[in-house]
Image (tube, grey):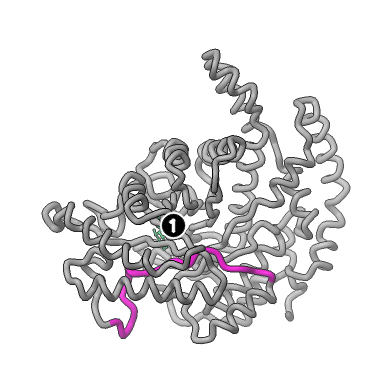
Amino acid sequence: MSSAADPRDPEFIARSNADRQADLTAEYESLGRVLGRRGVEIDVVTNAVGAFATAIPSWGVGTGGTRFARFPGPGEPRDVFEKLADCAVIHALTRATPTVSLHLPWDYTQDLAALRECATAAGLGFDAVNSNTFQDRSGQRLSYKYGSLTHTDAAVREQAVAHNIDCIATGRQLGSKALTVWIGDGANFPGQHNLAGAFERYLGSVAQIYAALPPDWRLLVEHKMYEPAFYATVIQDWGTSLLAAQTLGPQAHCLVDLGHHAPNVNIEMIVARLIHARRLGGFHFNDSKYGDDDLDAGSIDPFRLFLIFNELVDAQARRVPDFAPAHMLDQSHNVTDPIESLMASAIELQRAFARALLVDRDKLAEYQRTNDVLMAAQTLRHAFNTDVTPILARARVQRGGAIDPIAAYRASGYREDCARKRPARGGSSSGIV
Ligand code: RM4
Ligand code: MN
Ligand code: MN
């Protein structure tokens, strides 16, 4: 690289840590004493946090936009190989994001062997593959304007099913183990759809996709309350998603995208219900305030994120069988450098996880049993209010990452280097991703 430094280079990361190491040691030891007095062994938490991994969405490393405009950033990746390079930077500095979740056909390439090699060389693997039947691609025979897996025309449904099966084939070659199916299908007007019929058509289509799953794969059904359909979305909530998963069979699970609910919905309760049903397949982490669904994880309501992780840690503590939800980010970065946002978000997930690990579960259970409401709430707050920053930094350093990933990234000059090497292709266009 012609930049000041390659942020993926372990020596660069070690140099960037050198000045910060003494402060971190002091802060970590001090926190260790605080936690020790609470009966918590800090290294146990640090090791668990270090093992907590999240997949980067390939579409997240490009600059996003709204339906009004997109303002491209400098040095955006122009193909899937450049996206992988950016994902490698995120993982090298955070050591929290060892996998990439692809979106097809956006990430389509003729040379899958080269893609797999490129990922392996960068130390990356592939998480769930995402299908896309919410857009038409050039040269496509039939349009998805009025739906895909639920279209009234069987030929359109067949085309959408075939695309999903093709995604499975691609994912198999890359080492993925799951297909995430999110559809934009729905109605903009009352009367546009037969509500019952649309869901029945969905079940018929998705059953064909399910039948093509390898035995060690999962099909993740992702719900979304609205958008692009504004009146009635076919897979609109966790109830419909669970119904679909249970109808399909044991390899079908529900994916919870945090941004896909009405404001104020109690997402941690949805998570608890899906855990009960043994159908929590995974997450698309992000945050939202109003009708947006792709703000940075933990940027609006970190307490809610903590409460969701509290359910996950509780399920682990209860040893729920086959409990292995996939963790993926799904964000749109419109006004920040996507690499910085994704690093910060991956760290926010670890922060929420670390805080959830600090909840004194025995005490909480006792307060719940005796109906000591105030102390039960205080037990959660106490964990949430603990500053676990030194734990997160130590977990990164132990795995070769940076104490301060964003500072190291900025110092490396990676973005400036990309801006030189990846000249923009054309002007601004609209589009959410
Ligand atoms: C949707 C949904 C899907 C994602 C697309 C780009 O809102 O979250 O997961 O693939 O956006
Ligand atoms: Mn999503
Ligand atoms: Mn979304």
Q: Is residue 36 left or right of residue 312?
A: right
Assign the C terminus to one quadrant of the image.
bottom left
Q: Residues within 10 Å of mark 1 (few under 14, many from 20)?
A: some
Residue placed furthest toward the front: 215
Residue 39's spot in the image, x, y percent?
Answer: 77, 27
Confirm or reject: label 1 Cβ below 8 Å from ligand 1.
no
Find residue 86 and report its image quarter: bottom right
Assign the N terminus to one quadrant of the image.
bottom right
Magenta run includes residue 36:
no
Looking at this view, is 417 or 305 the one in front?
305
Query: Which residue appears at 82% of the width and 46% of the height?
Result: 24
Looking at this view, is 32 or 168 the one in front?
168
Magenta run includes residue 137:
yes
Residue 117's spot in the image, x, y percent?
Answer: 64, 80
Where 112 falls versus 203 (above or below)? below
Residue 151's spot in the image, x, y percent?
Answer: 21, 66
Looking at this view, is 60 or 249 the one in front?
249
Q: Quadrant of ligand 3?
A: bottom left
Where 288 falls versus 6 (above or below)? above
Q: Is residue 214 left or right of residue 52?
A: left
Is disc 1 placed on a helix, strand or loop? Answer: loop
**Which residue range is magenta in the image?**
123-140
Q: Amino acid at mark 1?
A: Gln
Residue 334 visible in image: no
Query: Which residue appears at 53% of the width and 56% of the height?
Result: 329
Where 133 falls versus 274 (above or below)? below
Q: Which residue is mark 1?
A: 251
Query: Which residue appears at 64% of the width and 47% of the height?
Result: 350
Image label count: 1
Kindly report the secondary structure that dominates the magenta region of the rendered protein.
loop
Query: Which residue appears at 81% of the width and 60% of the height?
Result: 16
